[in-house]
Image (cartoon, rainbow, N blue to C red):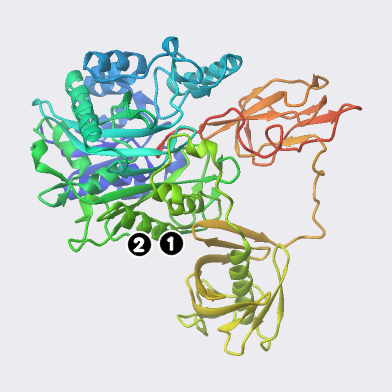
Amino acid sequence: MTIHTLLVANRGEIALRVFRTAARLGLRTVAIHTDLDATAPHVRAADAAVRVESYLDVDAVVAAAVAAGADAVHPGYGFLSERAAFARALEAAGVVLVGPSAEVMDRMGRKDAAREIAVAAGVPVVPTGEDAAYPVLVKAAAGGGGKGMRVVRSAAELEEATAAARREALAAFGDDTMLVEKYVERGRHVEVQVLGDAHGTVLHLFERDCSTQRRHQKVLEEAPAPTLDEATRARVRQAGVDLAAHVGYTGAGTVEFLLDADTGEFYFLEMNTRLQVEHPVSELVARVDGAPVDLVELQLRVAAGQPVGLAQDDLTLVGHAIEARVYAEDAYAGFLPQAGRASLVRWPTATSAAPAAGPAADPRGATVVRVDHALADGQVVSTAFDPMLGKVVVHGPDRESARRALVAALDRTAILGLTTNAGFLRALVASEEFRDATIDTAWLDRHELPRPEESQARVVAAWTQAMLTATSGTGEVGDTGRARSGAGPFHADGFRLGGPPAPQRVGLDRPVVVERAADGLRGAVDGVRVVQLRAEHHTVLLDVDGERLEAVVDARAHEVEVVLRGQRHVFRRPDPAADRGPAAGDGTLVSPMPGTVLDVRVVVGQEVAEGDVLGVVEAMKMELALRAPFAGTVTEVDAVAGRQVALGATLFVVEAAPDAPGSAGTGADSAGTGAPSDGAHRDGGAR
């Protein structure tokens, strides 16, 4: 068959990525969207668009494909990409799914069934619960990507952990069947990118390492895997091919393995019957005649019934690639989901886009930056979809050059208006542990990266505010930092104008003294020497006590926002007249994130002990238990199961018992830290 019109049953960066290849191939493209996404980037990028009530509505999406005259549907990842019912519905409507058959999805989509198939294919599997002592891993049989998964370290934890995993799995997959397997404490996640066609060809496009995870959600991915010896590497790749061939796989898929770092043994985990979020790293290292592969193009070729057109020997591995997933979450507050309007967005300049846009590497061995995203200035990020905002991917001639280039690229990633994990990613990639490839799948659950220190960002904020105060309201700061005529992004924003150079007292989160020389380019902030090198388009480049700092700054009436090395810092001016609300320790529990009340376990008048769960809030696939900060009586319950709540909304109030010890706080969990106590943030994509 020939594909003329392609509908992408997804949104965000993956929809845009598929559209790029489709456009290069001359295909007509069709987007689907909900009301919330009516003007989203993927809708604007397509040749046509169809409204649907939900991205998860099989009947509506199939009807949209038929109405649009689509020959084929690319599901992306997440949403309906691994739903056999969707594949069958498309087939019944005469539309081709860019992916494997419904039968293969049925067989490989369930971990219990996939495990049996792996055994039959001669692929090693993880010992089951009956054969393994604690700790064990309880996980959903029907799903993947970290959903419905809990680590259990003792029999006492098993019941509650299983119940939480069942609830999560039922909501995500409609099936709460659980598996219990050996939990490998020091494991590495290694996966093989496979590709098969209907003509008997099954290839691998080398392997990826996705060991840098937290709570089973991938954070960084790279190719090739940096710690494998060549014998193990060959065995892992062959195991992926053997399993795909055994099941008759067609299209692009991923076979995931867990490598025990202590023993060197590897075990089959699951097969993802779709394109993966991390597919760009494979595209950047896998070459045919020196050119990068385009996995989406190969998917479309197979979907049209054509041979892949490649043999294993045609593929060569060139260099090293690393991907960082940028999420709307606060990595230094328990990875809590964030929402809001992205006022300013700065992605690093791509030196290569997706393969559809051109070559992926400089023949001279230079590093290359690729950015897959769908976020721009002014867009609203909600909790209705997965929190991934984009992916920053770098390719280099070797791992260390790629790692250094990724640090630099994340330095140039700035999202203002809401908190993201970009600063956390930057710190992680720059760490000795990642440099030395010693991070295993549980490393981030055992270690905490310190929150970036604010002093340098405060210097940037204070200097910029002083500059704006002294700059004409109609002036723009040029390359030298001197005011020039014409409106621009660094206008005074309503601050006082003019005045001779003199020490200024700038009000941030605390008073800061700024001294500026007559030329406005030299001075000091709280005695720290500053030289202004550039200031334009909300970006400032300063020499601060001998160190060059480049930051994106947004100064408004009551706060100055700075993104430095990817990390967002907000300096709010105190308002003496503001109502400061209840003091810490008064027993008020507020929602630590915008989301939905999942469960309410108490009523007014009920006595509770310290640490008792009062309710559960869910957002972006993270469950967060709110616990009593001390023993006492519940005096207010403003939470209703199923109701949407805003960040900071009061949900419960507990009055301390007369003999109760001091309160531990008013936030989520017993310590009020906002860190999830028994939730799990799961792997995702642009869902």
Expressed as whole percent of the image width and height from the top left, the position of residue 479 reads 45, 80
Q: Classify mark 1: residues with Cα within 10 Å, few (<14), some (14-19) or many (20+).
A: many
| Mark 1 lies on residue | 412
Expressed as whole percent of the image width and height from the top left, the position of residue 68 reads 26, 35
Q: Amino acid at mark 2?
A: Thr
Q: Amino acid at mark 1?
A: Arg
Looking at the rendering, which quadrant does residue 91 occupy? top left
Is residue 618 rendered to the left or right of residue 566? Answer: right
Query: Can residue 325 be seen by looking at this rendering?
Result: yes
Expressed as whole percent of the image width and height from the top left, the position of residue 159 reads 58, 14
Looking at the rendering, which quadrant does residue 233 occupy? top left
Question: Pointers 2 and 1 in contact (CB under 8 A)?
Answer: yes
Classify mark 2: helix, strand or loop: loop
Image height check: is 164 above or below 539? above
Image height check: is 618 above or below 534? above
- Residue displayed at 23% across by 19% down: 92
| Mark 2 lies on residue | 349
Classify mark 1: helix, strand or loop: loop
Image height check: is 566 above or below 277? below
